[in-house]
Amino acid sequence: MKNAWLQTGSEYRLSDSTQQHGSLPPGVYVVNYDQRRSELYLSRTADGFQLPAKVYGGDDRFVDRVVKTYQSTSDNLGVMLNGVKGSGKTVAARMVCERLKLPVLVIREKHDDLPDFINRVKQEVVVFLDEYEKIYKYDDSMLTVMDGVLSGEHRRVFLLTTNDLHVSDSILSRPSRVRYVKTYVDLDLPTITEVVNDTLQNKDMASATIEYLSQLKSITMDVVIQTVREVNIHGEPPSAFADVFNTRPADDLYEVLRALPDGGLKVVQVKAVVSPARLGPTSVGQLLRVNGRHMGDIRQVSVDQSTGDISVVFSDEDADDAESTSVTYVMRKHQYTHYSFT
């Protein structure tokens, strides 16, 4: 007897019952496990995915390619989208789902009988595995489903998102399983500028906002959008909230110079990471490190207000008598700029 979907509210369960529901209508379904019945079932969560009003970064062209390939082939289709959180890969996956207009089965955890459950779905669907490497990092149990060995005439589109590419070698370099692998990196300058110009309310703060973004270690779509929102909400430039906003500035790099007895300066390091990260009067008594090397205990810190140079007097650990010997280093902030701006 043909498998049927029994619907109770938002729940859909496979059954051999003659009370057939027909096929799953398009929509978003989460695969859940019923402990009491020891079976998997679907919970319908939405009619579709909500997408932003405008998509940046050229994903439309990639989505067009995926959809055209699906329409022009007869086998299963695998797509892997890789990148850090907030980079836009999930939005791209949702765009594919909306264009294909198929039921979407969202998988959030691994179950032993999941491959069999998917194979029992007798219609074309999208199988969406967000953060695939956390669910099936080195587990190949889904491969028979992806290969279409058991699914017969019913095709599947497998959408896999990952935060890194530490997945089974059986997945990578196998276009018959995963045809497309797209990696999302930090946004480029034209995209950053476009987002800021489109969404920033006070255009006079555009330069300050872009300058702030240029000094971050990672610039994802989420970082840019939330930074602009913060500026819009409070009507102030990023410098006013940089110390509390949850972004990652690049490590402060310094040009380190040693003060000589004749008043001159000798370059010690050109781009060095210095610890403590924030040098100031409160640093006195702490250990000074330059690129991880122990230099000595800090005795005095002063800042030249006109140049921003930081003078650090510390005990020389290499001297025979560290109590009586001190060295002065001058730290000059090295201006970091994200590679997207160079």
Image (cartoon, helix red, strand yellow):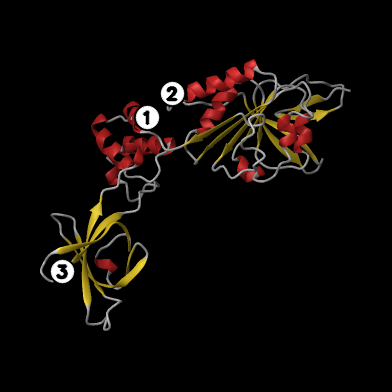
Position of 110 compared to 279: left or right?
A: right
Name the residue carrying label 1.
191
Q: Residue at x 72, y 36 (%)?
A: 143
Mark linked to residue 260: 3
Question: Helix, strand, or loop for circle 3?
Answer: loop
Label 3 to label 2: alpha-carbon separation: 58 Å
Tell me whether circle 2 and circle 1 mark residues in contact (CB < 8 Å): no
Question: Helix, strand, or loop for circle 1?
Answer: helix
Mark linked to residue 54: 2
Q: Position of residue 129 (x, y in %)?
A: 63, 36
Classify the position of the C terminus by image quarter: top left
Q: Position of residue 203 (x, y in %)?
A: 26, 29
Q: Position of residue 30 (x, y in %)?
A: 67, 33
Viewer-nearest of discs 2 and 1: 1
Instruction: Identify the amino acid type marked 3.
Output: Leu
Question: Helix, strand, or loop for circle 2?
Answer: loop
